[in-house]
Amino acid sequence: MTPHSGHDLILATRNRGKVGELITLLAGIDVQVHSLLERSDISEVVEDGETFEQNAVKKAVEIFRQTGMPALADDSGLEVDALGLQPGVYSARYAGERVSYEENNRKLLAELSGVPEGERIARFRCVVAFVGDGYRKVTEGICPGRIGLSLRGTNGFGYDPLFVPAGYSQTFAELPLEIKNTISHRGLALRRMIPHLREYFSAL
């Protein structure tokens, strides 16, 4: 097990986009942030839960067990009303296993072809789980919006070029990161988690 200080926190993800967002959102907390990008010795956690919460908790528990470091994990996805809340927990593999963001976006547009703008209601949902020594907390964030008719913007990742948050005309991929972090599902879930992180680390 790698030696670590009491104020180390590991992010249970290798998604560079998520790591960047989470590090930015954690900037105000006195912790040394690590991620699985630094740990090739850690095996992938199979996300086989039926809900975002099951997947997030499983990842946090497993990475805490493997590293001995308090672990923060999230599971998030897109729910589209016209598709019966799909792709949901399968958002990352909507078009198949190990597919590109582009392939997932292409499938989503195809599934929604013919669905008028007013019926393309969707939301991003994120569940964040934190697991430390004798400590477990879960928070959730939801960002309502709709699915655009075409890909727009170059920022962000995943379905960001298609998702137009409520109250905006730009997609997540067109908005500056500081605005996205203010309104996003992940930003909201993490801001709800921050008091728990402060509580945990202040007690060490």
Image (spheres, grey):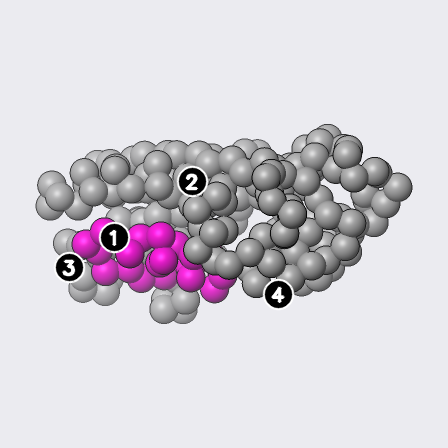
Callout 1–callout 4 Cβ contact below 8 Å: no
Residue position for label 2: 188
Sequence-first disc among 1 and 4: 1
Judging by the rendered image, the residue that carries numbered circle 1 is 28
Q: Is residue 159 magenta?
A: no
Q: Which residue is mark 4?
A: 154
Query: Which of the labelled discs sits on residue 97, or is there none?
Result: none
Residue 65 left/right relative to 169: left
Q: In the image, is 113 to the left or to the right of 93?
A: right
Q: Is residue 145 left or right of residue 95?
A: left
Q: State the separation of the CA atoms marked 2 and 4.
A: 22 Å
x, y percent for residue 172: 58, 52
Query: Which label lies toward us, 3 or 1?
Result: 1
Contact check, label 3 and label 1, Cβ < 8 Å: no
Kindly identify which residue carries mark 3: 5
- Residue 48 in percent (x, y) is at 55, 42
- Please state the horizontal and vertical placement of residue 184, each as a whole percent of the image: 49, 45
- Measured in 3D between alpha carbons, the distance from the residue under mark 1 to the one under mark 4, in whole angstroms, is 27 Å
Q: Tell me the CA gap for discs 3 and 4.
A: 37 Å
Disc 2 crowd, CA 10 A, few/some/many (<14, 14-19, 20+): many
The span shown in magenta is: 15-35
Is residue 99 something one can see in this rendering?
no
